Amino acid sequence: MCRETAVRVVEQAPVASTSASVLPEAELGVPQSASGSIPDISFIAWDKDVQDRMDANNLAWGVQYEIARGVSDGSWLWSNVTEEIIRDLRGSNAEAAPKVDKLLNRSKGRSVVGFNEKVWAELDREQDAILENSYRGLGLQGEWKGEKEWYGGQVQQVARIFEVEKGNYHLRLERMEMRKSHRFARYLGSRHFMQCKVPDKFEAGQNFLLKKFILCGRVFVPFCVKDGNVYLLETKENYQRRPSISQGDQYRVDFDELIAWHNPMHLNGKQSVNKWIARFDLGLSTSVPVLKFEAENIHFLEDEHAPHQGPEKVPTEKIYTDGCGFMNGAALMIIARQLAAIGHDRDARRPTAVQGRIFGSKGLWVLHPYDQSPDSPPRIWIRDSQVKVKLTPNRPWLVDELRNLHPAHFIFDLVAPSRASVGARLSRSTLMNLSHNKVPTEVLAELMKTSLKREIEPLMSWDGPNTDVLLHNAVDRSGRVSLSRIQRAAAGSARALGLVRRFDEKNQGEEDDESDGDGDPLDADETMHLSDKIICMLQAGFMPLESVYMYDEMRKAILRVVLKFVKEYRIVIPESADAFIVPDPCGVLNEGEIHFKSSRNLRDPLVYQCPDILTGDVLIYRNPCRLPSDIQKVKAVQHPALSEYVDVIVLPTKGAQSLASLLAGGDVDGDVAVCIYDQMLVQPFRTPPTSKEPPNFLETYFKPVSSIQTVDNLWKEMQRVDEGLSPGERQRILQRVLLKSTTANYEIGKYSKCHENAAYSLGYDHQDTIRLAFMFTTVLDSRKTGLEVNHELYLKDMKRFFKDLPECMADPKRPQLDNSNRLRRMVRGPFILDELLKEGKALVIEHEKNYDSRKPLKEKDDDLVKPWKSVAEYCKTLIEAKDDLGLRLAAELDTVKTHVETCCRHGWQGIAWGQSSPVKQSLSKQKKTKADNNKTLNTWAKKFALGPDVPVPILRSLGDLDLLMASYAFDYKPRFAFAVALRSLCMIKASAKGLSPMTLSIAQAISVPSSAVRIFSAQAAAFGLANVL
């Protein structure tokens, strides 16, 4: 879409404000450069005339956003937004925003999605909180406008970057969302922030993001990049509009004010610029405000470390408490109550540790060893290693200094409470490590087989009593249907409420890089859609042995599960668990010991006397395992002094270096470790010598540390008074630094790929493999350290190791055409992933053969064709009785048949739905073909749903026309019918099986209770149905 479509400048006098209050001293603003000229700006959507009218009528911000979004995506023009429409859109967000689509008629086929009542109501709450101006958005002020324990910042304004032409970009608005809340948005309000995803290919992207972006006369400035998203702040500037008191414009802040509030440059001058930039992540982390501390109860605490000689700083690997402080029992109890208020009821107990942010610090806070009373004032101890942003000049800080800080800095923003999750999943890097350290291939292959069997058996149990209920539960669990719905409902508090497994969180489970093959080879939304569809069909009464279509859909679902296990080595170890690692608060553990007690059973309670606590030899590691020594064998012990430390893995504070640092260079600031206590893996494992960094590693392979810019240097550059730098020019310098990660290539994915190729070709413990592992971990951290790889050595590494991965590691989403660009295996002996892939392929063949032997013989479903056949029989009876109604009814039946067949011919039969060969068609072309096919089907599905153009009054009077069309579509072309009329077919089937009326919201919240699963499974086992494979 060209810029002129989104922007129409009308040169006329501004319309006087009639109902919206404006700041009397304000003039129509135009962002200025130092020379007085208008700087580079980019229009998201703006029209002077319409904006004046919207401001004059004081339209709610959500209404303005929706109007602008329609212009932005080409659904209508600014000229369509008339004075009459603007007047009709007055009112609150909840009242008026849902009307925008209807009043502007949705040109160009813009789809109607039910308006999000929750978003609009939340925007109204936030707007009232902004106008109240009492920091209510920060949370912890109780009920607000019908919402208990309310806090702000829960709405996201989302945009996408589109390349209009080569090197020319444009921001397009998307629908507002409610998925998370972060501190910045709670401080200023959701409406003052925008986020947009950075495209994979973003040439000249930084220059584009240095512009000022105009939306409805408001100026948004990009200021931070996090997790591939650029965040924009609405500043105090205006573009040819007057700021409005009734909109709360007087409470906006400028770019430099936000920095001074969150990360003041003059107090953090010694930090590297990269580390200082990374600290903005603290304000953008998804979190929940749970507790406010008084200034006198915030204490500074030095770190504990191993003996260290010399004047230099203690290295991080020697710091036992790196990133972990204390919180007293009263504070943790308050957090537990706060979580209960927003929906957390897991075991209804006080957490042992909490991960969060407060007072410029981040990390983990564990229960204080002595201050555990629930009745004391809440207190917190912050370690030196946890302080990431200095907010006061002194450390330890003075209470009077603290009292002068903004209230937001005293609020503990919770990221996640401690919890133990049983049944960890091995990644391919973990498998390579286990195999290298003498765990037999046969053991790992058997684990894969039993793990797959455990997942598949419930999906294949189709006969006997209550199998529909058991199959519903199996599909729900396998496709995570109910869990995904709950996570969406919980939005930004999902992690804090314990609704997200460790390996589902970014950067916690598998290696997060482009070369990692542990991702889903099939689109996640597509997988979710398939499971959702099967759940709907099961609820309606379809079963695989009675419906060919249901059988085929189940085949797809099961095949996806098998492929996950086989190609991605999704091996789940029942006798394993993961949890936060914390330093021993009492100092009672010896070197090589851990303490792990859980609030739930870690082992079978019918076998073990104390199933909630581990004793004996265990394996412990963090993901990703790149070095031979990244997995450690330690001894789990039970100690009475640590009995209160539940759902955390306690590490010793003894030894030459911290145990956490041996686990892939970890620390205790919220790192999660996996503990394996399956003796089939533990007993044969041999801990290798600690892998050491190559001599002079940083000096040899990275550019000199002296080249890293500090915040002090940046501050001096911005204060060049002699050159007469304007505030705008200083802001531009700062922006360029803050946003450089949009184009900086940290080579994380490339070094991950190089390491895996070296491990395959040269061996897991070869010196080049070990060096590349250290290169990967150092580059991974370079966003904070500022280290850059020596260019000459980088080119050598890429030339030698950056090749296509071997088949056992290759990404299934990127099929390889040949093996010419792969490294050969240069060491003797089989490679573990080759062996597991070979075993897995045999399992795929076995399961496919077993499944195909159970296909139902009957193609047609009598229940589904009955509505159409009943009307056809009725028509025939009328005609035989020479009733005129019969001929008219027959004509209407022909009209419906023609409509269905036309939609099927254009939307289904002319499309090649099978996948093309990778050799014949590239992945990008496959995706485009699939998208085009789906677009064609969706177009004709909408036409199908609208019904025939010719009226059919008799058929409408006889019953539900949608059901009749669906019934004939199934009789004519069953697969087309399920593609365009699934809900109608489910309604027909449910009516035939015994309909139970229920609203959609209730149906989507229902899952099978675990008690019912246990009882029905026991009954199925009694009938010999548990082992169908």
Image (cartoon, grey):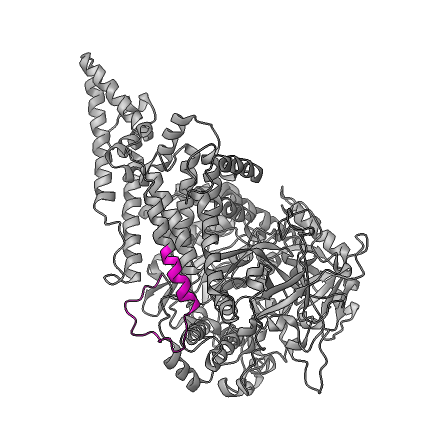
Asked where in the image residue 794 lies, by quadrant, the reply is bottom left
Residue 665 picture location, percent across and down: 58, 73
Q: Is residue 827 magenta?
A: yes
Asked where in the image residue 399 lies, by quadrant, the reply is bottom right
Q: Over which residues does the magenta segment extend?
A: 813-842
Residue 900 picture location, percent across and down: 24, 35
When the figure is inspected, residue 920 is found, relative to residue 785, above or below; the finding is above
Residue with the most extreme top position: 881
Name the chief secondary structure element in magenta. loop
Residue 580 picture location, percent across and down: 63, 61
Residue sitting at 24 percent across and 22 percent down? 872
Instruction: Say which of 703 and 438 sits in front.
Output: 438
Asked where in the image residue 995 lies, by quadrant, the reply is top left
Residue sitting at 25 percent across and 61 percent down? 921
When the figure is inspected, residue 97 is found, relative to residue 509, above or below; the finding is above
Residue 536 picture location, percent across and down: 42, 38
Q: Is residue 74 visible?
A: no
Q: Quadrant of the C terminus?
A: top left
Q: Is residue 614 magenta?
A: no
Q: Quadrant of the N terminus?
A: bottom left
